Image (cartoon, helix red, strand yellow):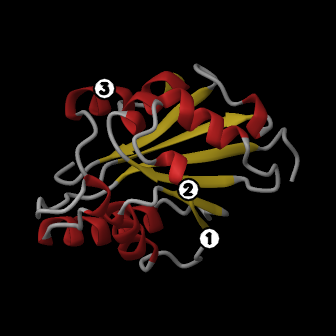
Amino acid sequence: MSVAEPRRIVLFRHAKADWPQVSDHERPLAERGRMDAAVAGRKLADSDITLDLALCSTAIRTRETWKLAVHELAHRPKTVYEERVYEASPGELIAVLNENPDDAQNVVLIGHNPGVQGLAEILAGSAEGDARERMSRRGFPAAAFAVLSFTGSWKSLEPGVATLLDYWAPSE
């Protein structure tokens, strides 16, 4: 694919987690989280974005979220479980995305707040429709996702270069 073709980034926060007596990394999804993850997967499927690559935090709740969401997609992308996504800042997430191969046109990153929300906010130099207003109003609750687009190589991804195309959250 040409770097002149628009790329899509889906920034997807894990669904609602439970709070058992385990380490933060090992927290599973709550029952509501399992339902919301599947609904988010259906909403992603409705977006008609064919995902080429999924970068997923190694935390249990993100892995479970992705497993339930990807089941709803017509095409299952290659999934990479990336330790650096867990507890990452927006800058650290950009560094991970900068390493994507240029043949990956559409990528989903399944991670955590505040990094995922911060990344959506700093990447989006512009927005379509009311997507930014809805994201600002709702924040980035569990199972929310934002769809952004930019043109260029993954190495060129930096603050302000993307357009926020869509935003979805449970109860949206």
Look at discs 2 and 3 and give the one toward the viewer.
Answer: 2
Q: Secondary structure at mark 3?
A: helix
Residue 112 position within the rendered picture, expressed as x and y whole percent measured from the top left: 36, 45
Question: Residue 133 shows which numbered tag?
Answer: 3
In the rendered view, tell whether residue 44 sits above or below residue 3: below
Which residue is tagged 1? 77
Q: Earlier in the sequence, mark 2 or mark 3?
A: 2
| CA–CA distance in space, label 3 to label 1 | 30 Å
Residue 47 position within the rendered picture, expressed as x and y whole percent measured from the top left: 48, 59
Give me the residue at 77% from left, 34% from top. 155
Which residue is tagged 2? 82
Image-quadrant location for residue 98: top right
Residue 10 visible here: no
Image marks 3 and 1: residues in contact by CB distance under 8 Å: no
Q: Secondary structure at mark 2?
A: loop
Look at discs 3 and 1 and give the one toward the viewer.
Answer: 1
| CA–CA distance in space, label 1 to label 2 | 15 Å
Where, quadrant-wise, is the N terminus in this rendering?
A: bottom right
Q: Report the amino acid beneath label 2.
A: Glu
In the rendered view, tell whether residue 23 sits above or below residue 32: above
Residue 148 position within the rendered picture, expressed as x and y whole percent measured from the top left: 54, 39
Q: Residues within 10 Å of mark 2 (few under 14, many from 20)?
A: some
